[in-house]
Amino acid sequence: MTTRVSKTKKDRAAAPKQGELTLGPIYRSHKVYNEVEHTNTDGSTTTLRVPARAIELTTGEEFEVYDTSGIYTEEGLDLDLEQGLEKLRDGWEKPEPAAASAAKPDLKVQTQLAWARAGIVTPEMTYIAHREGFTPEEVREEVAAGRAVICANHKHPEIEPMIIGKKFAVKINANIGNSAVTSSIAEEVEKMVWATRWGADTIMDLSTGDNIHETREWIMRNSPVPVGTVPIYQALEKVNGDPTKLTWEVFRDTVIEQCEQGVDYMTVHAGVLLRYVPLAADRVTGIVSRGGSIMAAWCLKEHKESFLYTHFAELCEILAKYDVTFSLGDGLRPGSIADANDEAQLAELRTLGELTRIAHDYGVQVMIEGPGHVPMHKVAINVEWEEEWCDEAPFYTLGPLTTDIAPGYDHITSAIGAAIIGQAGTAMLCYVTPKEHLGLPNRDDVKTGVITYKIAAHAADLGKGHPRAQERDDALSKARFEFRWHDQFSLSLDPETAIDFHDETLPAEPAKTAHFCSMCGPKFCSMRISQDVKDYAAEHGLDSVEAIEAGMAEKSEEFADAGGKVYLPISEV
Amino acid sequence: MTTRVSKTKKDRAAAPKQGELTLGPIYRSHKVYNEVEHTNTDGSTTTLRVPARAIELTTGEEFEVYDTSGIYTEEGLDLDLEQGLEKLRDGWEKPEPAAASAAKPDLKVQTQLAWARAGIVTPEMTYIAHREGFTPEEVREEVAAGRAVICANHKHPEIEPMIIGKKFAVKINANIGNSAVTSSIAEEVEKMVWATRWGADTIMDLSTGDNIHETREWIMRNSPVPVGTVPIYQALEKVNGDPTKLTWEVFRDTVIEQCEQGVDYMTVHAGVLLRYVPLAADRVTGIVSRGGSIMAAWCLKEHKESFLYTHFAELCEILAKYDVTFSLGDGLRPGSIADANDEAQLAELRTLGELTRIAHDYGVQVMIEGPGHVPMHKVAINVEWEEEWCDEAPFYTLGPLTTDIAPGYDHITSAIGAAIIGQAGTAMLCYVTPKEHLGLPNRDDVKTGVITYKIAAHAADLGKGHPRAQERDDALSKARFEFRWHDQFSLSLDPETAIDFHDETLPAEPAKTAHFCSMCGPKFCSMRISQDVKDYAAEHGLDSVEAIEAGMAEKSEEFADAGGKVYLPISEV
């Protein structure tokens, strides 16, 4: 049931201004919140308000789509960024501690994994089930099996819970980072608002340099989606950028600092072992992971295993306390087609599997990061290896790029690999922008990257048979065939671009109901002719193979007489 | 051996002006022609000059790539569009007529198919063999088997021969059409020059309206690549756009007119049978092929099979005379995810197989057109069906689009499907531009469509193991790892865009040799750190698993002492 509706009067969201936030509804849609009853462990109930975006069709119907944009797409919003978002989850039940695992029955923790294993359906699970079209029990089972994760730090009550797992819709992540010179809280928050407006399911704050903590605080308090980080970046800043000065203590304190702020998942490159570094020596592109290269440098210098590996159990205890999810980083991922699926990559993946089992024993949720650059025929096997070696922990890949020869278009070279690896079972795709390998993405690049990855993720959902996926394709295609241009625009991933492209050649409003577009023109519009054919065939009883094969002469003549009418629309223009 | 070199002094091709041609070399490259000796049937030899583009690397080496741009990328060109290109193939041997097929041993024709079956290697085959890196005999075998086609009308001597077949590099087609108001020959020719500059292997002239014949003449006489058409479009213009007035005679005369002009392949929707029309009645998007909808209308009106089907043998005799290749059109291809792989589509495909065997009996080469809109999990089976039912005739598909929900981005939704179907064995991919479903593509859309499809085709070549494919990926990745920015740009599919993106944030020339870019900055450049790690590991004998596991203490200390030096580059900036 819809509890709050903010209709948009405009056909377009207000154009954002520099340094301000992009606010307001997306083209011909409004935010809705569906009320769902959750039953707590004590039998009491809590009402959850699950968000969606309702697209207003010209037929009078509404079409609801999964929505990550938070309150920022509501009409007439009154924001206080200093205050931050409502602490949604503070009002929800936080069940008693449960056994971390069968391996550690006496260790009691409060994580979605431990609760799921204990048979407890949390409010987050109920919320997610409604959001994705599954039952709460199905959600609990996937989390309990470690096949899905709910990235939700206890210290981040503002987020709208979401799930990352192969059974559910493929998710996408957008990376953001602070500017060299941070000018305002609005400017930093805008990057998150802009990425989630177009569909980013999570964001990673890869800020470096000054003001890391403050910038992250602004993002944490105002983000409706889970936030991930790579703690080694901030730790490196604390030792003035010199990896040789890195220590377990500096790293640990940084992790705790970020856990306290509410970071929901953290990339940790604990699989880069000393003996693996030489395996990357003869590669075409060596080590292309920032964290991976930093830890490799540290390992060689110290000539011992990294503190990320030797102190992994302590890390698990820290993350378990906050229910922060591990994103075990692939520090040795391939950076070129030539290096794909090599021993360095696979050796590290096996180690990530070992670490996954340790984390799971501590009741900590785990994702596994994957490549990178991989030619098409070597993509799917990556999922098979990951599932076999890492106990089916959700796979989270960067692309992969399926060729190296198109800098400037790597959102496309990687969308091909992303769609394939998503269909094969990868749970989340880290977006790649057109600026990959070339420079820092700007606002347009971020949007292009997000939309491109929504395409890859949706193509994968269709390919793997997600129960709800095809509904939107069918609704848009039906609108297309019926020349409901406004609906074709509003149902698309990026209405603004679709409208701009259409209006370049046929700007007038009447064209929005015309039975053709400038691509083929009125005479050659196959859909128009096709509709004439369909209508008149039905009218003259020629709409079945039987009728046709009966070769009904009189029908034929009668139809011929009507011919002028049938084809008038084609030739009259 | 290189016989003609036109070095570019500029780092950029001259920016084209409206109404003029885009001429001159592509960034840091020049045209080369390699001389190849061809042995004629009488034992004499002919020297063929096979074109390529030589990219000038900063290492002093040159990297040759397949090149479709004709003379237009030469330096200091003196063009006469009225005169047209040199009639290259007029100087080549045209072997005596050979038996059309085993089925028609007494019918003698002069087609690449008949000659290949007779064991004759034509100059075109020798030329193509060198261009693609195969032996002339390998090329002959594929053509003889009907698995590959050489689209080369005897009346089109200007083209540089190319081949379309699953064993060879995946090719791409770009559609062009005349403007509503044609202002100049240069403007029409520019569309072809622009598309082939970026890599279109063939172009289809889909002109409608006035001046069809004249516009096509300009394109034919100046195109270095094969040209395809859909004759039914011009035939329809001849009957004032009314399908009910179409007759076999009008169509036949149009085909002959186009054969005489030199058109290399023609789309004919002869598989749209009367009894198949009702199969499309309940589709979400009906019939989306222009030619298909026109013929469906005609069939219903006449209540009999189309003249394309009933006169197919006569069509074969006409095309055989010129060695024009059939592109059997999929008039009932699906136009939405919901309609993919349905009975209407498959029924027509079976009929196209029947027509393929007839054409092959007449010695006529054949391609089969394919979908369309297909979700990922239903893509590959399309190739299996086509190969089984159509005797492995080269498959030529439009995309397919893997989702319907992203108008404005259908070059991307379709590049995913195109790469997958190309890897599965599709020989040529018809490009889709960002304007698909929305309007007429402009100059930028055409370039985006071509580059996007070069990416899909190349990803497919890597995926299916084309012997030469990975060389370019390796060369570019090596340049990337060695921070040879100019080489990374020049080896890319679109140097201009790569440069523009890089220079947005680091425009200065010194940045072209800098060991980082603005994406990660100097401190966090993994490739830079990785190189330091590699160099110093080697220097200190820590570059093997054995050395590492030996845990050589003194090496470790010695290396630790050198640590300052190792990491200086990382922290000094």
Image (tube, coloured by chain):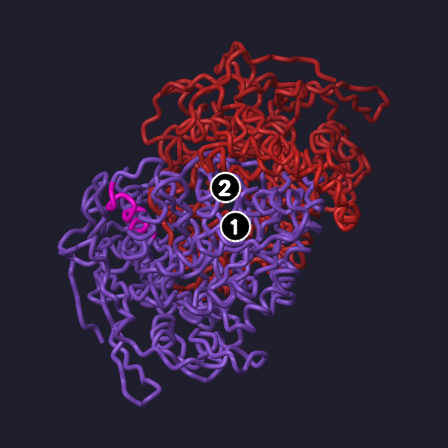
Chain colours: A red, B purple
- With respect to residue A321, does A49 lie above or below? above
Mark identifier at residue B264: none
Residue under the image location 73 percent in, 33 percent down: A539
Q: Secondary structure at mark 2?
A: helix
- With respect to residue A444, does B332 lie above or below? below
Q: Can you identify the residue that label 1 sits on?
A: B399
Q: Is residue A153 magenta?
A: no
Boundaries of the magenta span:
B184-195
Q: Amino acid at mark 2?
A: Asp
Determine if residue B560 is in view. Answer: no
- The subunit letter for the residue under badge 2 reads B
Q: Can you identify the residue that label 2 sits on?
A: B410
Q: Earlier in the sequence, mark 2 or mark 1?
A: 1
Residue lying furthest right: A43
**Image position of B192 (left or right of B360):** left
In what quadrant of the picture does the N terminus of chain A appear? top right
Foreground pick, A210 / A463:
A463
Q: Amino acid at mark 1?
A: Gly
Mark 1 and mark 2 in contact (Cβ < 8 Å)? yes
Foreground pick, A539 / A471:
A539
**Quarter of the image where one finds residue B128:** bottom left
**Image position of B247 (left or right of B184):** right
- Percent across and percent down for residue A22 are 46, 20
